[in-house]
Image: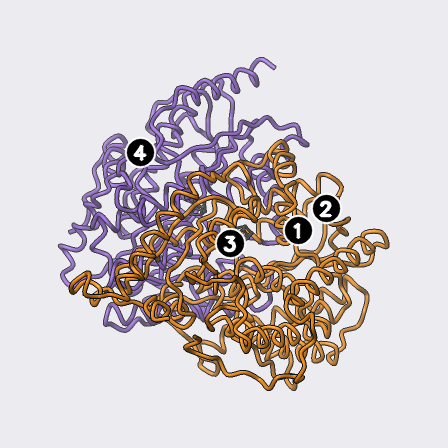
Amino acid sequence: MIETKISLTPTPSAQPEPDLVGRGRRDGNRLFKEWYTELDAAAESGDPSAYVFVMGSTAEVLKAFDLNLVFPEINSLQMAVRKVSLDYLNKAEDYGYSTDVCGYVKADVGMHLDGRKHPNGRIPKPSIVVATNMCNTYVKWVEIWQRMYGCKVFVLDIPGQRGIGWSSEPGSEQFENDRRYVQSQLEELIEACVAVTGKPFKIERLQENLAHVNRMAADWSAVLKLNQNIPAPFNAMADGLAYMGVLSAYRATETGARYMAELRQEMEYKVQNGIGTITEERFRLHGVGPACYAYFRRFLELFQEWGAVYVNSEYLAYAGGGLDQGIQFNVERPLESLAEQLLVTGRRSMSNMFFSQDQLADAVRDWKSDGIVYHSVKSCRTVSTGMADSREYLTKTKDVPSLFVESDLVDPRLWSEAQFKNRIDAFFEALGARKAAALNPHELGGFAVSSRGPQQVAAKR
Amino acid sequence: MAVEVRSGFEAILEQCSGLAEDVTYPSVKRWRDSHPGGHAVGHFQVYFPEELIHAAGMLPVTLMGAGSRLEAKQADSHIGSFICSICRTSLELGFSGRVGFLDAFYTTPICDVARNLAGIWGRNFKGMTAEILYLPQNANGKGAVTYLRDEYARVLAELKRISGRPIEEADLRRSIGVYNENRRLLRDLYRIKRETPWLLATTEAYVLAKAGTVMPREEHNEILRSALAEIPNRTGRRQDRVRVVFEGGFCEQPPLDMLQLIEEACYIVDDDLLLGMRWIDQDVPETGDALFALAESYIERSTYSPVQHDDRKPKEEMLLRRVEGSGAAAVILAAAKMCEPGLDEQVAYQKTLEAKQIPFLLLDFEEKMTAFERMRMEVETFVESILFD
Ligand code: SF4
Ligand code: SF4
């Protein structure tokens, strides 16, 4: 049944634990709750906290100062999943924010106006906030907290890919110019953390954190690749999101590294035993753009009803902090290596948004996806602006089937189920016909031959 | 063949307005005809160090949308639904072939829509360099200027490749000199508008300045000098009007009709229109390493905008300074529709003005809007409320 197997690490134990399947979700949920409990305690005690973003959190540095990490994007997403985002959006809009402003920002503003009471617990005040330039809205967002709390703002600038076909490899003059800039900023970030926490900087702590990330990234990258198997052991949109929550919140910790090793174990077990995430995997999808979290369950069901599994998603690459292809920090030269890897991974994440076409085509091929689902979200111009164009490019140059739908991450007012369903149904009908034609090329004369695309690998099953 | 400068203020104005608003770019075409083998380089809003292009003997052209003069027919299918108009029509300029004369297109990280333009441009207009000039977003970092100097050197190398000619330090210095003069002349224009707005309306200053975005700066300098020489002869009479600052035109440009209707009710004594041309607000040093001088000026000798975070320039304070410096009594707080940075900033400005009890009017606009009746009423009501308060 399974055509391609990804090379597996030795099975950790001959007898897998009985509850191995589903452990990643269970442990993820538990860790997530614990994390919010810690934040609630920090809100009470007033322990210093840092507000950071999923893309470029610099957890490696901040955790060396024992700062609590608050991820406002995750907070906003959670409000949507818990169906309360509209209340917060309304508060921010009443305050003056336009309906055209990113919903993540507005949901968060609403929560701050409401005394930082989040449905998952209280959120501590920021002592320092760190924004990378990976989304420009981050920079506008941190300015809001700066005005509210007078907290220290640090913008970490990571120069990205300059254009299509442009690259700069570590060691090149171009790369070194950019690295020196990033490294000098990291030094300044450390100074800022010393000032905010009153604690000295200990390089050993940074080294430990880097080592945790090395392990975590290697396992995360392996987990993602395991989904190249048929059937896919997890759904990149649903399970992937839960895994990614731990990836962000527990980055640079022993707990996070252990979690990811165990997750890998689970996925390997599932692959070895042919356990897919759904009973019958009919279609394999690659997601571009996040889901609609305000109607998350419905969003997922509409695809699952057709036996479709998201085997990969761009979101896991960029919102996963660029760990998708693994990271190997050189802990012997920690700051330099951190600067270097921030550039490499940051760039890759940004390229996934601004110059995505080639990586996307490769991913569709490697994960044997039947098609791409582009979900354009009003809130996020960062990921949505170039989607239609990148889609057209891939359709023309690689003949990749795709679906384009629009709604929002957190704003339930922008969700129209009837429209979504119509388009999804039409897409799968066409995709089904295409797969059938690929299996019986004579029925379509020469057409099937000329339309051979990556989806046919899966169709051979 | 250079643009011939007409005499008489009205004639100069008419000439500039023709050049600035024409989306067929006649001045660029003329330049290309008179410079066989010459190259033109386009850049998107807000700021680009045009001195680099100029020093390479190329023509810099600012792409800042096309207002209501161009429908985004083809661009609409290439770009998301919730995107500002300036990006749509700027892309349409490409898709419709109107800027086919360009050899390169640069955008900067002012926002993520603008960064995405490099990808869309590159995927669709082959054979043309399409890049992001990564202006630093950590203006407070000690390494920012050196980094930017290197980034300018990178762009300069690409421009050298395109132009096929060397670019010497002396070329860069000469270009800095030309642009310094341009910025001085624009400062003069703004001074007149601030001190004697009855002699120079904002719409007039705007078209005079905008003409510079589509022609060599030496010629623009000549036009500005002639216009400035004519202004004292104008006969406008001082009127008892409310003095306002117009804030919110840093990227997408409001339609001229909108500025005009505001000016019918009040004097716009300062603004952030065509900000890129005036981003550097002092002379760039004409000695020392030219690229360093430009990079340093971007950070150290510059104004403010919603698309640059600089702890030394809190934007609300900068706006208050602009209000105070221009003796304005009120602010028109505008924002382009769908513009994340502009809309975010609008709230911060609003709260500050409220706290300082400075009257303000919130206006959302689109470059392509053509119906202004409601806006006219809002502006008139606003002005009356100040006059009769
Ligand atoms: S614009 Fe997109 S990436 Fe940026 S904060 Fe909003 S949702 Fe996140
Ligand atoms: S108008 Fe705003 S959103 Fe549009 S390109 Fe300019 S800064 Fe970006």
The answer, for residue B303, to whether it is visible in the render is no
Q: Nearer the viewer, mark 3 or mark 1?
A: 3
Chain in purple?
Answer: B
Residue in front for this viewpoint, A165 or B7: A165
| Circle 1 residues within 10 Å: few <14, some 14–19, many ≥20 | many
Q: Identify which amino acid the numbered label 4 is placed on.
A: Glu
Horizontal and vertical percent position of residue A440:
24, 65
Q: Secondary structure at mark 4?
A: helix
> Residue flagged by tag 3: what amino acid is it?
Pro
Disc 4: host chain: B
Badges 1 and 4, same chain: no
The CA distance from mark 1 to mark 4 is 60 Å
Q: How many marks?
A: 4
Q: Earlier in the sequence, mark 3 or mark 2?
A: 2
In terms of sequence position, does the residue under pointer 2 or pointer 1 come before the other?
Answer: 1
Task: Check disc 3 and report the residue beneath it.
Answer: A290
Judging depth in this view, the residue of A207 and A270 nearest the camera is A270
Q: Which residue is mark 4?
A: B230
Tag 3 and tag 2, C-beta contact below 8 Å: no
Mark 3 residue's CB less than 8 Å from ligand 1: yes
Q: Residue at x 51, y 16 (%)?
A: B381
Type of the residue with mark 1:
Asn
**Marks 3 and 2 on same chain:** yes
Which chain does the residue under circle 3 lie in? A
Q: CA distance from mark 3 to mark 1?
A: 15 Å
State if disc 1 and disc 2 touch (CB < 8 Å).
yes
Residue depicted at x 43% and y 33%: B365
**Label 1, on which residue?**
A75
